[in-house]
Image: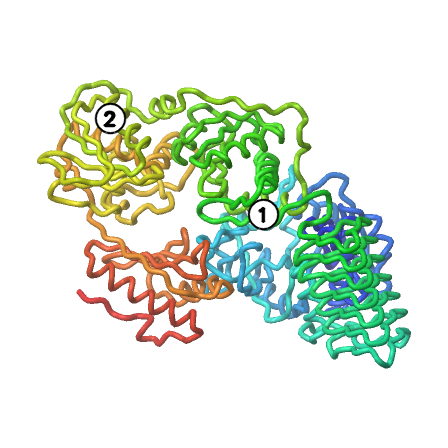
Amino acid sequence: MGLQAIIMAGGEGVRLQPLTCSLPKPLVPLLGEPCMGYALRLMRQHGITRIGSTLWYRPKCIRDALHRGEKWGVSLRYYEETVPMGTAGSLRMAMNELKDTFFVLSGDGLTDCDLTQAMAFHLEKGAVATLVLKRVGIPLPYGVVVTDGSGRITRFLEKPAWGEVVSDLVNTGIYILEPEIFAHIPEGGMPDFGKDVFPALVRSGLPVYGYETDGYWCDIGDLRAYLKAQQDLLSGRVRLPHPAGVDPAARVDPAAEIGEKCWIGPGAVIGPGARVIRSAVGPDAVVGEGAAVTDSCLWTRAAVRSKARVAGSVLCTGAAVRSGAETGEGCALGPGAVAGPYAVLRPGVRVWPHLKVAPGAVAARNVVTEDVAAPQWSAAGAACTDPGDVCALCSAYRKVTGARMVIVGGPDGALRSLAEGALAAAGAKVFGAGDVTWPMLRTLIRALRLEGGTYAGGGALRFADRQGRALSARQQSAVSACVLRQDLPPAFDGSGEVTHLTGAEAVYLSALLPGDAGRETALPVLVCCASGPLRHLAAEALRRMGVSRVRTAETPPLPEPGETGFLLAPDGESVSLFTRDTVYAPEQTALLRLLLLHREQGKLYDLPGTPRAAEEISALQPPDGSDACARQRTAAEDGLATMLLICRSLREKPLEAWMAETPRTHLVTREIPCRTEDKGRVVRQLWQTAQTPHVLGEGVRFSHPRGFATVAADAHRGAVRITAEAGDTEFAHELCDLYAGRVRALAEGRKMAETEKNAPFST
C-alpha cells in the first residue's frame, strides 16, 4: 500500500545552534522525546500509519533514533537526498508511493492540529492543495498567506517586512496534497512549496485552499520558540500525550522544591535545597545542592552544580554549569560545554560544543570563536557599536550577496574606513568614494557596474545590491543569521584590496545629466541646502546642464520674480519645489516628476510611495529590472536627480504650465499606536471587513470614488500607519480620520459597528 504522509526532516537548524551542531533539528528533545516523535504520535492518533520521511542533514542520526517507527505505532520509510532538492523537489523521491491524497508535515514543528478535520475540509473544497494556516502575532519569520471569504488562497508573501504584512495567517508547513501536485513540481533545481509551487498553482487558477487550525502550533526555529514549546507542553496547552511530573526512576531529595509545571526524567538527581521551577530535567541530569533551575531545559546527563543559577536556558547533553555559576535568559550550552565555577553568562550568550567559559569569567558574547550580537536594523541601516560589529556585518553582507566589486562611502569617516577594511578582509575589491550621499552611492554602483555598496552614516551601515537597491527584509534577515551563527567568509585570504576613487562626483553627475547638457538657458534657479558640499554639487550640475543663472543659499530666501526654487534635503534624498508665489507639497512635486518621466519613457512603475493620483497619468506597471524602471527609481529616491529632471522640462514651458497638467492630490499621514504582536491582525481584520475594492501593495489599499487610503504595519515601531490621499485636503483628512478610528478600535480589541464600517463621507 502507498504512503499516507511525508515528514520533512532534512533541516539543519542553524538558528538553533549550538543545540543542532551535531543533532538534526527534528531530534531536538522535548521532555525526553524527539520533536519528530510528536508528529508521528499525532498522525497515529488520526489513523495515519504509513509514513515516509525525507532526510538531508545527519540522516544516520534520524534513522538510529526513530528506526522504523515501531515505538509510535507507525511504519516509517526514509528517502535520503544526496544533494539538496528543496522542500517540493525532495517529495519526488517518494512519488511512486504517493498514489492517493496525502499529508506533508514538518519534522521540527509541534502541533496538535485536527488532521481529520483538515482532510474533510480539503475534500469538501475539491482542492489540489490545502495549507494548514495559523494566526500568529508576529508573522515576519513565516510565509504569510492571504485568503478570500471561502478560504481560497489568493496570495503568498514569503517572510515579509512589516510594511508588506496584510495578514496574520501564516503557513504552518502542514499540507494536504493530491498526487497531481507532481505535475507542477519542476524536476530540476531546488523547488520550494511556499516560494515556487503554491504561488504558481494560485497564478494558474487551480484550487489552493487554506484551512485555519484552532489547535496548537509552534515552529521550533530558534531557542525562544524551543523553550516556549516545552513550556506549552508542561502547561497542558498541547493536546498530545507527554511525560510530566517526577519519573519514578528519578531521585529527588525531600528538601528540594519541584514546581507544578516540571518534568524530572528517569535517573535524574535533584539535591537538597535545589529549586526546579517550570523546567525539564532530562534523564540522568543533575541539579546540585542549593542550585536553582527556572524556565530551562536540561538534556541527558547535563549538570547544574551546587548553588548555581540557570534561568531561561538550555543545557545540551553532558553540558555543565559549575558551582556558583549563573546563566541568563536565552543562554545555551552545547553538548559537553562548561561554564566554570562562578562564571556568568549574560543573557543570550551561547557556548558551542565542548568549549569552556573560564572560572569567574563574565561572557558577554557567544563562545564560538568571537561573535557579535544580532544586528539591529532600522531605516538608517544596521547599527554598529564597535569594530567587531562592522567586521561581522560586512563579512555577512559579502556572503549573502556574493558581491566582490563594491563601493563604500558616506559622511561617517571612521565608520567608512572600518567598512572598507572589513570588506577587503572578507575578500572584496573595495572602491572608496569618500563623503558621498546615499543616492550618490547607489547611482555610482550602477554607473561603475559594481556588485554592491556600503554607506556609512549616523553610526549605521546601509547595504545595497548590484542595482543600487537597499537590501530587502529577507536579505537583512539572511545577513543577521550569518552573523549569529558565525557563517562568514575566511578573513584575510589576500584577495581583497581598497582603492580610493577620484572624480566620484564627476561620474555621478555624468550619470544624471541629460544628453543635451551644455545647452544654454537663461532659466533662473535658486538652490537651497543645509549641506555646503551638496549645495555646490547641485549648482555645478545645473551649470553643466547649461543653466546660466544659478543662485545658492543655506536657508531659503524669498525667490526673485520668475525664479524656481529647490529646497534640497541635506542627505540628498528628497527635494521640495517652490516659487515666489507658491510652495508645492511634496506629493505635487512627486506627481510632476512622474508626469515628466512618463513623457520621456511612455510608462510608469508602481514603486513604493508612488501617489495613487499617478494613475491619472498612466496605468502603473509592476517594478522590473529595466533601465526605465531604474531611472524612475533613481529620480524618486534622489532629490538632485528630480531637480535636474524638472529644470530640463522648464526649457519647454513654464512651471505653472506643467503644474496645470499635473493631477491634484493631497496626502495625510497618521500613526496609531499598536502592539507589535497585534499589527498583522489589525491589518488583516481591516482588510476582511472592507466593503470597497482594495489592492494589495505595501499594506492594504482601499479605493474610494474620491480618494485612497493605505493601511500598513509600521516597519520599525509599534504602530499602524495610515496614509490618505484625495483631490482636496478636507476629504483626505476625513478619509484618514475614518481609517484611524477603525484601526484604533481593532488595536484595542473592539469590534467595529456596522455603521462605522460603512461610515458615509461628506460630499
Which colouring convention does the figure follow?
rainbow
Q: Which residue is mark 2?
A: 542
Q: In this rendering, is residue 289 above or below 522?
A: below
Q: Nearer the viewer, mark 2 or mark 1?
A: 2
Gap in angstroms between the C-alphas marked 2 and 1: 51 Å
Residue toward you, 699 or 442: 442
Left or right side of 230 for 502: left
**Residue 519: x percent and y percent?**
20, 19
Name the residue located 60 percent from the left edge and 39 percent from the top edge: 396
Q: In this rendering, is residue 629 above or below 692?
A: above
**Residue 493: x percent and y percent?**
68, 26
Identify the element where label 1 is drawn. Answer: helix
Residue 393: name its quadrant: top right
Identify the element where label 2 is drawn. Answer: helix
Q: Earlier in the sequence, mark 2 or mark 1?
A: 1
Left or right side of 130 for 298: right
Residue toward you, 361 or 738: 361
Outermost residue to the bottom? 254
Residue toward you, 286 or 162: 286
Left or right side of 65 for 646: left
**Residue 394: x percent and y percent?**
57, 37
Residue type, numbered disc 1? Val
Left or right side of 181 for 466: left
Outermost residue to the left? 561
Name the residue located 90 percent from the left edge and 69 percent from the top edge: 267
Q: Which residue is mark 1?
A: 197
On-image quarter of the N terminus: bottom right
Residue type, numbered disc 2? Leu
**Residue 695: x percent and y percent?**
37, 54
Residue 755: name its quadrant: bottom left
Name the residue located 40 percent from the left edge and 57 percent from the top edge: 712
Name the residue located 49 percent from the left edge and 62 percent from the top edge: 676
